[in-house]
Image (spheres, rainbow, N blue to C red):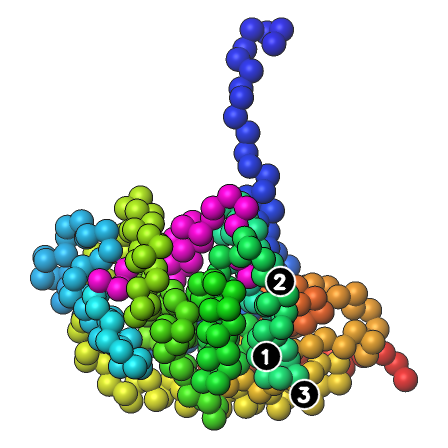
Amino acid sequence: MEDGSKQWRFKARKDLTSASDITIKGMLKKLNEAIDSTDPRPTIRLGCGDPSVYPSFRTTPVAEDAIVDAVRSAKFNCYAPTDGILPARRAIAEYLSSNLPYKLSPDDVNLTSGCKQAIEVILSVLAQPNANILLPRPGFPSYEALAASRHLEFRHFDLLPDEGWEIDLDAVEALADDNTVAMVIINPGNPCGNVFSYQHLQKVAETARRLGILVISDEVYERITFGVKPFVPMGTFGSIAPVITLGAISKRWVVPGWRLGWLVITDPIGVLKETKMVDSINSCLNICSDPVTFIQGSIPKIIEDTKEDFFRNIIDILRRSSGMCYEILNDIDCLTCPHKPEGSMFAMVKLNLSSLEDVVDDIDFCLKLVKEESVVILPGITVGLKNWLRITFAIEPSSLEDALGRIQSFCQRHAKKQ
């Protein structure tokens, strides 16, 4: 350069910026910036599945006391082993085994900093040259963003709204090729609020076996069900096809900020050990940050001492709120909720643009809604379905009723004139 200064050779990766744009956090940031600060009404947030800020969803005192005891014991100020503290892994193995036809070992459990780090680890391990992974649509966009950041190709199979958001297994078989390494399922479903039946999950396992691929089962909402279908862990079918189960305490105990998740090898026939996948997972964990040690130390007490009444109360609130959400939304002319939520904390709602006067698409709907009514909901394009909406009902019931009323007023105001 003419002034004699150095020509710098580094530059930012543009693909990381674009990957970040498709995340839920990225979209919610844009919506939050559009809030009208002059609106005297409180902003009601139905865009993010984090009910921990609401009194009705406060975690059990058992969990809070377990954290305090772990800190005061001075036993957990140290570095933890790569895969996590043994008592915590043992407690999680026993907890998950209670729902399985076989017993997990603590060696099957790897602790992570939340479920998202578990996703990062398994995608990093699978990101071989030319490999591709099959992802659900709609789904959780962190899978796309994290796969893109690791140059792992992803392909989408559809969930079918008219069939209770079941997986289009014919599409899975059509998408797969010799470079396909895994498929992801989310059960109970985010963003659809669906719960897969035993029979459907068995078909998933049989499809994976035919294709010779791994099933990654995201069960962060495990046991949060309130319909007719019980929660069935994908690991039940580990003898048909190998399963990596991802989970966390964040949703069932309503503590997403505590960042304690797990990656569990549910593979009774030993395929993952034989193919060195277990070694690769351990190697990846060796270069990752560990979850906070005192959180790990509190896990045995949290799992053992939490009473069923706590879980039952949360489920009862979600059952009532999901019913309210389903009924009111389907009474609004421009919205259709095709399937009543049976699990997790979300509903997917179809936006009928032909009924609206001046709304271009789902993003436009959400931006105008937050400006006019101070209600934040997530555009469906963020989770893979354009002109749909994802709404969480995991808030105080009175606030949910208020928010749904505001949505109804907004839709009436923007309805096409007859």
Q: Which residues are magenta?
A: 107-134
> Badge 3 is on which residue?
330
What kind of element bears circle 1?
loop
Q: In the rendered view, would you say 338 is above or below 377?
A: below
Q: In the rendered view, would you say 366 is above or below 26?
A: below
Type of the residue with mark 3: Asn
Residue 97 is a magenta residue: no
Name the residue rendered at 62%, 6% in the picture: 2
> Badge 1 is on which residue?
165
**In the figure, is residue 358 to the left or right of 317?**
right
What kind of element bears circle 2?
helix
> Badge 2 is on which residue?
175
**In the figure, is residue 327 to the left or right of 142?**
right
Residue 109 is a magenta residue: yes
Q: Quick check: marks 1 and 2 in contact, CB under 8 Å?
A: no
Name the residue rendered at 73%, 64% in the picture: 364
Type of the residue with mark 2: Leu
N-term-proximal mark, 3 vs 1:
1
